[in-house]
Each structure stands twice: as structure tokens, then as C-alpha cells.
Image (tube, helix red, strand yellow):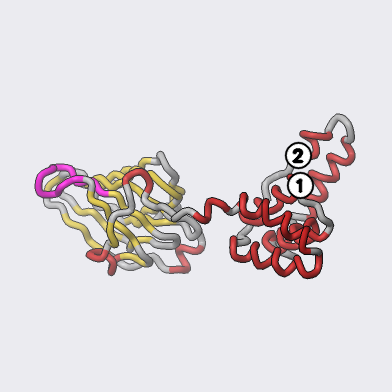
Amino acid sequence: MPKQTAGRDQLGDFAPKFAELNDDVLFGQVWDREDKLSLKIRSIVTVTSLVSKGITDSSLQYHMMSAKNNGVTKTEMAEILTHVAFYAGWPNAWAAFRYAKEVYKDEDKPEQHGGFFGLGQPNDAYAKYFIGNSFLNLLTDPKKDPLMICNVTFEPKCRNNWHVHHSTSGGGQVLICVDGEGWYQEFGKPAQSLKPGVIVTIPANVKHWHGAKKDSWFSHLAFEIPGENLSNEWLEPVTDEEYLKL
């Protein structure tokens, strides 16, 4: 859980001990005991406690936002409040739903992936070289343009196999990350974390792979660098054991 500073920010001068207990003990030592109780369960317990006491102010909104960030889905929150209503009082649950609708309002919108350049179509032609689902949006016409550019999108946990862009001169590939978070790794080297704005230059004849992180969609532009005697060699998959260590 991110380090809490609300106590010191709001009460540091007036009640420094209370601020210390709030930030360092409650939101530090207690919430940090994830080996005893997960953040998701702690959020559920906290929201339930606040609603049961009829506390429906900004503190409830904060803890609902934390619950969402800790993995409590919209469906789960609605079920939690419905269940609590029978034990803590119908008016309390009604008041809590007002905050829940605000916190989860973005989930009513269709989720968009692919970033500015769009998701494209399922990458069926290369599906056998990927673990998980990927999507391809060609941005240039390979028959007309000397430089092929495409937007590749990976669902969470999706990655391509180890592969090599062969060339006798020139060649290779450039990736420009545009949406979500992913990984790039060259054989024998540590994996590199990828976020929007990161540029990766992949030399020709180097074994590598790239793909999404386990909890994020990921999109990058791929630029195929012109060269001589170009070919792609697809190799073994990136195993779950390798991937989940990242």
C-alpha cells in the first residue's frame, strides 16, 4: 500500500501524535500485514465497518477507491453493500451506494485498448507464435511503403515467442511503447520494463521477446528496419516459469 501522509498533512501541527499513529501504525504497520490478511480483504472489512457505523463521508469514498485499487470489482462492491444492508441498515447502504457509483463509474464505459493507434484485428496469422491473444493494426501499406509500421497490442500475460530478426546488413526492429505496460528481454540479459514513451532498438540477429505484463494490456508500434536478406526466425515460447519471475 502507498505510504500514507494524510495524518501529517492535515494534523501534523495540531495533533502530531495522532498523525503519527494514523500514518505509521494504522496505514503502516496494520495495513502492511499482507501476509496475514490481503489488502483486498482489509478493504472489504474497512468499507463494511464504515457503512455499519453510518459513516458515509469522504473517508468512505477514499476506502472505496482503495478497495477498487485492491481488486474489489464493481459487482463485488454492489454485492457487499447489498449484503451489509440487511445487517447494518437500509439507509446506510443507500448512502454508501452513492459513493460506490461514483467510484466505479468508469467501469460502465467500454474498455478501450490499443492506445491512440487503435486495437486493429486479431493477430491470427501469427497466433501460433504467441501465448495469449494479440492484435495487429497495420499503419502502412507493405506494398507501397518501404518502412512497415504496425501497432501491436497484447492482452495481459500475452507475449510472443523468443525470436530473431535475421539480416546480413541493416535490419532489426524499433519498438515505441504507446499504451499500457510490458516487457522486453534479450537472451542472457535482464528483462526491461516498458511504459508509454519508452523506445527499444532491437539489433538484427539478436534473440529476444516482448509482451504485456501480467496485469496490464500493452501496445507498441513496431518499425521494421530495411536491410538485406531479411527473415524472422521464431523459436521456443517464453515459459510461465520464466515469465512469472518478472
104 left or right, relative to 99: left
**Residue closest to the far top:** 13
237 left or right, relative to 172: right
Question: For mark 1, what is the residue?
Answer: 57
**Residue closest to the far left:** 143
Q: Position of residue 151 (x, y in %)?
A: 29, 49
Task: Using a 10 Å C-alpha cutoff, classify the residue at mark 2 as few (fewer than 14 neighbours), some (14 to 19) or many (20 or more).
Answer: some
**Magenta stretch, main secondary structure class:** loop
Task: Tell me the kind of residue under disc 1.
Answer: Asp
Q: Position of residue 167 (x, y in %)?
A: 17, 50
Q: Secondary structure at mark 2?
A: helix
Q: Residue at x 66, y 67 (%)?
A: 79
N-term-proximal mark, 2 vs 1: 2
How far apart are the two marked residues, 2 and 1, measured between alpha carbons?
Answer: 16 Å
**The magenta segment:** 140-150
215 over 144 or under it: above or below: below
Callouts 2 and 1 close, C-beta under 8 Å: no
Is residue 156 at all visible to an observer of this figure? yes
Q: Residue at x 41, y 47 (%)?
A: 179
Question: For mark 2, what is the residue?
Answer: 6
Q: Secondary structure at mark 1?
A: loop
Task: Using a 10 Å C-alpha cutoff, classify the residue at mark 1 as few (fewer than 14 neighbours), some (14 to 19) or many (20 or more).
Answer: few
Task: Tell me the kind of residue under disc 2.
Answer: Ala
Q: Residue at x 33, y 55 (%)?
A: 208
- Examine the structure image and report whether residue 149 is included in the region drawn in magenta: yes
Determine which quarter of the picture holds residue 165: bottom left
123 left or right, relative to 27: left
Q: Residue at x 13, y 43 (%)?
A: 145
- Examine the structure image and report whether residue 196 is included in the region drawn in magenta: no
Q: Position of residue 142 (x, y in %)?
A: 14, 49
114 left or right, relative to 27: left
